[in-house]
Amino acid sequence: MKIGFLTCPGTHPGSPARRDDAFEHDYQVEALRPAMAARGQELVEIDWRSPIGAFAEMPLILIGTPWDYHDAEQEFLAQLDALEAAGHQICNSASLVRWNSRKTYLRDLEDRGAATIPTIWLERADSRDIASAFDQFEGNTVVAKRQVGAGAEGQSIHNKASLDQSWTMDQPMMLQPFLPQIQSDGEYSFLFVDGQFSHALVKLPTAGDYRVQSLYGGSEQPLDPAPTDLAAARAIIEAIPHELPLYARIDMVRGEDGGLLVMEAELIEPYLYPMQGPKLGTLMAEAIERRLAK
Ligand SMILES: Nc1ncnc2c1ncn2[C@@H]1O[C@H](COP(=O)(O)OP(=O)(O)OP(=O)(O)O)[C@@H](O)[C@H]1O
Ligand SMILES: [Mg+2]
């Protein structure tokens, strides 16, 4: 049984446009392929832009590593719709992907009781919005992020004592209090497969930065989470207002009261940190098998 794994020119094996960080693609495939093969599932890497006919023998398609979809989001969503219309099961589904592609999904999670970071949502923002955010959050440091995007692109941090009065962003933005625990305690990632906990890790920024991404020098360590922290992550999975995702990475940071707050729920093409999760391949293959049997 063939199982598709979507790629893009930046990640597809042998592609002349392969990115330097495509080894992350290889790690994920190496974690999944043998466990899937043991259950009669053949993982087939396939560029997401391939014609629908090329997916003919793949009843289930994993979103994989289509890292360039941000540059062609409508085309990507249309392709997922077309694949579903042709009878393929996409994991995660087109409806989950649509919901997850704007950070406004955090509001839905909050409405359903999830512990979130206080956030001001704006269609565009300037320094006056930052000034009122200092007041509203009763703090001296505010993080401004784009509602759509990844890799901390377009993100900025603002201090009350040195606010740049000319700062402005002409696109949908979100403002949050800066949580200093990101620097001391780090960002926690919890990986779930079909709602089952697979593994966790903690990501720390390099000294002097607050962004945990490897691009900015951040590093990660495997983690055996405390039961209350794991329960907080599980509560995020349960608050998703759609079907259970096949795979999910819940990123969290500790708030003032010591409880974990959701930073992001990554359901589209999260890096799954396979090196820190020895059970990942087996859990995924079992979950795929259950889905194929339905
Ligand atoms: N409120 C906050 N307090 C402290 N640090 C923050 C806050 N918001 C974001 N950060 C830092 O910035 C990083 C990027 O933010 P976030 O994950 O929300 O955006 P992103 O652009 O989707 O990034 P990515 O997709 O690469 O994870 C976080 O991992 C964290 O290190
Ligand atoms: Mg993030």
Image (spheres, grey):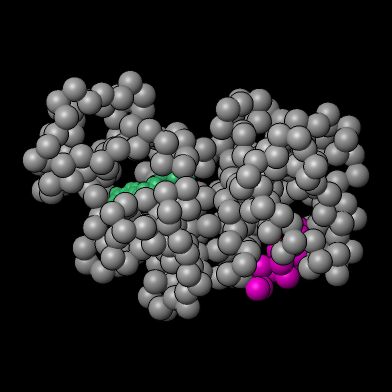
Q: Measured along the vertical axis of the image, is residue 144 above or below residue 177?
A: above
Residue 41 locus on image (x, y percent): 86, 60
Residue at 71 percent of width and 54 percent of height:
26
Is 51 left, or right, of 265 in this rendering? right
Residue 254 locus on image (x, y percent): 30, 63
Q: Measured along the vertical axis of the image, is residue 263 above or below residue 51?
A: below
Q: Is residue 110 visible?
A: no
Is 44 left, or right, of 105 in this rendering? right
Query: In the image shown, does 101 or 274 lie closer to the viewer?
Result: 274
Q: How many marks?
A: 0
Overall secondary structure of the magenta stretch?
A: helix
Q: Is residue 191 visible?
A: yes
Report if residue 205 lies within the magenta region: no
Residue 158 locus on image (x, y percent): 20, 39
Residue at 82 percent of width and 54 percent of height:
43
Residue at 16 percent of width and 29 percent of height:
164
Q: Quadrant of the N terminus?
A: bottom right
Residue 169 locus on image (x, y percent): 30, 24
Q: Measured along the vertical axis of the image, is residue 142 above or below residue 70?
A: below
Query: In the image shown, does 80 or 49 lie closer to the viewer?
Result: 49
Residue at 44 percent of width and 76 percent of height:
225
Please give the range of residues in magenta: 278-291
Q: Measured along the vertical axis of the image, is residue 72 above or below residue 38?
A: above
Q: Quadrant of the C terminus?
A: bottom right
